[in-house]
Amino acid sequence: MPLGKELPQLLKQRLFYQGRKFNFDVARLRLPNGSEGDWECIRHPGGALAVPVTPEGKLVLVRQYRFAAKGRILEFPAGTIELNEDPAKTIKREIEEETGYRAGKWQELGKFMLAPGYSDEIIYAFLAQDLVKLEEPPEQDDDEDMETVLFTPEELEKAILAGEPIDAKSISSFFLARPFLM
């Protein structure tokens, strides 16, 4: 087999940290060329995200505080997939909790890895249409601090291109949804 076609051999793996939302492990690998090294990986159960569109064509996003970003960033509603949960179920719950809207029509947009250099997290993206505002939205989780904001697709694209603080999963999902929006 030509060099580069073989996969590295796992020699040892250890859990370095076990957290509430993710784990961190370190693996000792032997590469096909014989060299050995340690690789770190954040193990995450994955997430689901919605690109919600109101009947008027506005996109529903949340601006929320993110510790790692040291500030508030703009994001589409999203959530971590619970053990053995279908990503569609995850996002249907999260969109109601985070925005106070319920979608009548759902479409899968795709899935993608966020940072395969150090994490196994996969995001499942959905287009959520036929939104209805809930009369009494569910309470947000205790650890969430967010506000709902509306953008036209054109406004959001301008914000992305202007470098506003917007996370990568939202930018990627916006461009997956764009053919359905404009």
Image (spheres, rainbow, N blue to C red):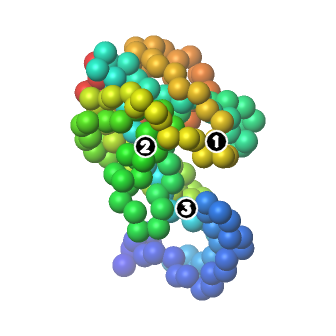
- What residue do we see at 66% from left, 36% from top? 145
Image marks 3 and 1: residues in contact by CB distance under 8 Å: no
Q: Which residue is mark 1?
A: 144
Q: Pointer 3 and pointer 2: residues touching (CB < 8 Å)?
A: no
Q: Is residue 24 visible?
A: no
Amino acid type for the residue under numbered disc 2: Leu
Query: What is the x, y in percent for residue 50?
Result: 39, 39
Residue 151 percent coordinates (x, y): 45, 17
Tell me the element at label 3: loop
In the picture, the disc for residue 49 is 2
x%, y% of residue 74? Answer: 57, 29
**Apparent side of residue 124 relative to residue 67 in the rendered image (left or right):** left
Can you identify the residue that label 3 sits on? 44
Distance between mark 2 and mark 1 Cα atoms: 16 Å
Callout 1 crowding tier (Cα within 10 Å): few <14, some 14–19, many ≥20: few
Q: For this view, does 110 lie left or right of residue 31?
A: left
Q: Nearer the viewer, residue 53 or 5?
A: 53
Label 2: state its secondary structure: strand
Mark in front: 3 vs 2:
2
- In the picture, the quarter occupied by the C terminus is top left
Q: Residue furthest bottom?
A: 11
The residues tagged by marks 3 and 1 sit, at their Cα atoms, a distance apart of 19 Å
The answer to whether residue 103 of the structure is visible from this angle is: yes
* Residue drawn at 65 percent across, 63 percent down: 20
126 on left or right of 16: left
Q: Who's the residue at 67% across and 46% down the image?
A: 143
- Which residue is at 33% across, 42% downward? 126
Q: Amino acid at mark 3?
A: His
Dot 3 or dot 1: first in sequence order is: 3
Spatial CA span between label 3 and label 2:
15 Å
Considering the numbered disc 1 on the image, is that residue within a helix, a strand or a loop?
loop
